[in-house]
Image (cartoon, rainbow, N blue to C red):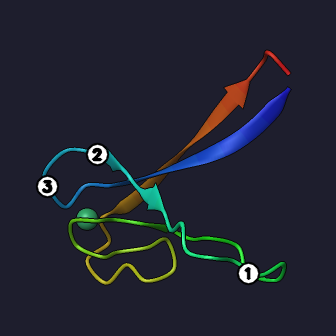
Amino acid sequence: MTTYRKWYCTCSGKPVELDYETEVLTEDEVGEPICRRCGATNSSDPKKTVVYRDIEDWED
Ligand SMILES: [Zn+2]
């Protein structure tokens, strides 16, 4: 079983899943989910609109 975290932003009034940055990443740098609408991320969330859900994947 694998548990992974999905990030959402509620800036539009309903939770919208965040996109992961897809720029070239180094080994030390992990892409951070970012809201394409307001630019919030899980570590830069001035309006407190970013929420997450932990998803359990039982197929693993
Ligand atoms: Zn947003």
Residue at point 55%, 74% (across, down): 23
Q: CA distance from mark 3 to mark 1?
A: 29 Å
Q: Amino acid at mark 3?
A: Ser
Residue ranking furthest to the front: 24
Residue 4's place in the image compared with 39, above or below, is above
Residue that badge 3 annotates: 12
Q: Amino acid at mark 1?
A: Glu
Q: Position of residue 17 (x, y in %)?
A: 38, 47
Q: What number is the disc on residue 15?
A: 2
42 left or right of 36 in image:
right
Mark 3 C-beta to ligand 1 under 8 Å: yes
Residue 44 in which image quadrant? bottom left
Q: Amino acid at mark 2?
A: Pro
Mark 2 C-beta to ligand 1 under 8 Å: no
Q: Position of residue 54 (x, y in %)?
A: 61, 41
25 left or right of 20 in image:
right
Residue 28's place in the image compared with 17, above or below, is below
Q: CA distance from mark 2 to mark 3?
A: 8 Å
Residue at point 14%, 55% (across, down): 12
9 left or right of 57 in image:
left
Residue at point 80%, 15% (across, down): 59
Residue that badge 1 annotates: 29
Residue 27's place in the image compared with 20, above or below, is below
Q: Which is more N-terminal, label 1 or label 2? A: 2
Q: Position of residue 1 (x, y in %)?
A: 86, 26
Viewer-proximal residue among 57 and 51: 57
Q: Considering the numbered disc 3 on the image, is that residue within a helix, a strand or a loop?
A: loop
Viewer-proximal residue among 60 and 48: 60
Q: Residues within 10 Å of mark 2 (few under 14, many from 20)?
A: some
Residue ranking furthest to the top: 59
33 left or right of 1 in image:
left
Query: Quarter containing ligand 1?
Result: bottom left
